[in-house]
Amino acid sequence: MSTDEVVPPSKKREFLNFYVGGQEFCMDIMPVREICSWTNVTTLPHAPVDVLGVMNLRGAIVPIVDLSARLGLGPCERHERNVIIIAMVSGQVVGLLVTAVSDIVEVGSDEIQPMPRISCAEASDFIAGIISSREHTLRVLSTDALAASMTAVRAVA
Amino acid sequence: MSSLNEIRQMFFVECEEQLEQLTDGLDTLQEAVSDGEQDSETVNTIFRAVHSIKGGAASFSLDAITRFAHIFETILDEVRGNQQELTPDLLREFYGASDYLAELVAQGAEGEETDEAVLDERTERIAALSAADGDEGETDFSEAFVPVSLDFGFEPPEGVEGPQSTGFSIRFVPTPELYANGHEPLHLFRELETLGSLTVEAVLDEAAADEADPATPHLSWSLALEADCDEGQIREIFEFAEPYAELEIMALEPAAPAFDLSAFEAPSDDEEGFVPFSDPGSDADLGAEPSAETSSPPIADTPPGAAEPAAEPAPDAPKPAPEEKKSAAKAGPKATVRVDLDLVDDLINTVGELVITQSVVTQSIQEAGVQKGTRLAASLEEFRNLTRHIQEGVMAIRAQSVKPLFQRMGRIVRETAQIAGKDVRFVTTGEDTEVDRTVIERLVDPLTHILRNAIDHGLETAETRIAAGKEPQGTVTLSAAHRSGRVVIEVADNGGGINREKVLASAISKGLVAENAVLGPAEIDRLLFTPGFSTASAVTSLSGRGVGMDVVNSEIKRLGGRVSILSTPGQGSTISISLPLTLAVLDGMVVDVAGETLVVPISSIAETIRPQRSQIEWADRRTQMINLRNIAVPIIDLGQVFGYSDVPAMDRDGVLLLVEDDQGAQRALAVDSIHDQRQVVIKSLESNYGHVPCVAAATILGDGRIALIVDVDEINHRAAAVGTVASKEVLA
């Protein structure tokens, strides 16, 4: 279930833009199930720091990951406008806490450039590519890498 | 076409049931045989099971099953007719045959091709058991399956006394059960008619008709059948009706002096129909009769008990009937419905939501300040009870006895024992234990692994056993039982036990443990569950690929269960699997631990204690103990286990929950306070996240918040494993 590759060049894809740790990212909209506001979570013992806990999403138990912390940008500052992106990542439903969501953009897959491997920052592991337009540069969050990191969390747990 | 498919599906489901009866019967027989008894009732049950499978298979043109079942049935019939004695050897062959039959049915269900060579070999093998010579079996076979064509062209001369073949006089007296079981004499008679010309005479029992009970049948029948068939074919037609009726079949032949017409008490106007039979026919007709069996005197040639002499029907004929009735009542086909599993699952999910909603309502009403004793509170209580009832009912639908699983395991044991060349006695207990069916399905692979291991590695060879002073036959016991809200399934063998030196040496050579590690016996035993471990010096075809036991362990864990192993050198090993009863709900105590809400399963709590300060002592730097009725019970602080708090709950005036582990050791779990006791719906944490240490699952409380369900067993387990090491270090 690779969402980052093998797409015909002409095909347009939609991306959800969001802010995390003061930076702008986007992710493929296909795995996104819904966006909901912050609710109280139940903390999980012995969980990694970036796993905030679990929330009740209409009867389903969904773990919430602080995306900012996961990307190595420090813990997310709590704010009323914080939202949770509910996404399906490798068969599991996961909530990603982000500062805010801003927009949905439609991009041809040929407009996505590979991420230049210059930094060794933690964040670059999660970046599938870069979309640069006149106004700004967007980093595409790799759901595959995210999934891999979730698996790693489980292994630790 | 689809409806035919449905019927076919149904046939295979029924086949499973018949196979179950078959194996059951064989087990009963085995006991009887070892006690030196004869159990004709069980032989009948087995015979009927095989016969039903054959019949069904024939209608779906499943030739392989039909062919094999037929031969099998023939041999069983010989045992039934006392032509063969049931020896342990024969019984072993029967087991083999029933296993193979199960295999054939499985192949049929999957639509797989049958290996003709194997079928031939198996068929020959079972046919060779026949007491009669092999040819007879074959003839019987063809006869039984093309009976109609033999008689089709045959036009019996009606009312005319012409060339006369053999005939039968049949008396059929139904009991009320016949109708209660849905039999219809008309269908039986129609079927009889396919054998030859049939005359039916109804006899009204006027004395009985005067009685008030309308449920008692007042009609019996006298039938006259002119047909070129043998008695077996007639018996076959009445096969399923026979237990519920008095049936007498008399071979009629002109020359037979033993025949006594008066025994039938045929009304006078029926005499016409009987005349041709009672009239001594010409000897030439008798000579023309091809079947040697029917032309000889009936009493001498028919199997004992098959046909009673007409002169004394009373003492013998009714005797088999009550016996068979008893067996029918015992195997009791209760009225059941087949339901699509998805429907049940849907229902269970809905009921789960109902339980949550009910607790939301209860909580809201309590918050609204409704007093106890009001009508609303009473109705609420009623609502709660009803919800519980529905829930238990739905759970019961899903529950299934472990019996089919155990029988399937029996097949595996026999197969494994054969390949391993070991003589194994397989004992099962607690087969009626009911477990959620999803659990049963997922137990197949782990149990298969464990049993194979027990036979292949656990049991010694016969020579070694004799040398050790044991009986040469090894025993493997598979048992199931409910124990404190869980199901415990155990596989025990009386083999050599775990060779701990070998296990440890092997683990060290594989780098699983450090060379200088000092491990206790229990720790060494647990090494068997380590991934990549295998003790077999030689890899056998059965087990020993080194994946078995750790797969078992992880699969059982996934079911919320736990595997433990207990081994005594020279005496054998026991592997216990402890499983939750259901995967959907549990009774829990809602507690507060350092501001977090947790649920502790009631089933694991022995009692709750509000201790006096004076009862609590420091056992060491980190562990507190409570003196409980002069027993020092270690305290495990849940706040510390889950990392919620560093301050011991005992310093915050906490409450203790006394729990016991599998070995009966007591521990006290410290919590801040107890809120409530309620039924909670188990929600998996693992489906979206993963396993959290010491947490069994999660649930949703009345206010919509998630609470974690404490895995008391795991806490106990870890506490036991640490021994003197402080719990915190291990849990961190």
Image: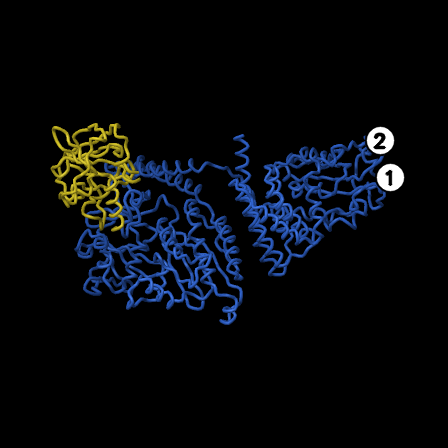
Q: Which chain is blue?
A: B
Question: Does B126 sit left or right of B472 as displayed?
Answer: right
| B325, B259: nearer the viewer | B259
The quadrant of the picture occupied by the N terminus of chain B is: top right
Measure the C-alpha gap from mark 1 to mark 2: 13 Å
How many neighbours does mark 1 have within 10 angstroms: few (below 14), some (14-19), or many (20 or more)?
A: some
> Observer-nearest residue: B427 or B115?
B115
| Residue B160, numbered label | 2
The 10 Å Cα crowd at callout 2, few under 14, some 14 to 19, many 20 or more, is few
Q: Drawn colour of chain A?
A: yellow
Q: Please state the horizontal and vertical placement of residue B44, each as a whole percent of the image.
A: 64, 49
Total numbered labels: 2
Q: Quadrant of residue B499?
A: bottom left
Q: Chain for mark 1?
A: B
| Residue B128, placed above or below residue B235 | below
Image quadrant occupied by the C terminus of chain B: bottom left
- As helix, strand or loop, the secondary structure at mark 2 comes to loop
The answer to whether residue B365 is visible is no
Q: Position of residue B602 (x, y in %)?
A: 33, 50
- Name the amino acid, label 1: Gly
Closer-to-camera residue (B25/A112): A112
Which SS class for mark 1? Answer: loop
Q: In the image, which disc is placed on residue B281?
A: 1
Question: In this rendering, would A46 be left or right of B392?
Answer: left
Asked where in the image residue B212 lies, by quadrant, the reply is: top right
B507 shown above or below A6: below
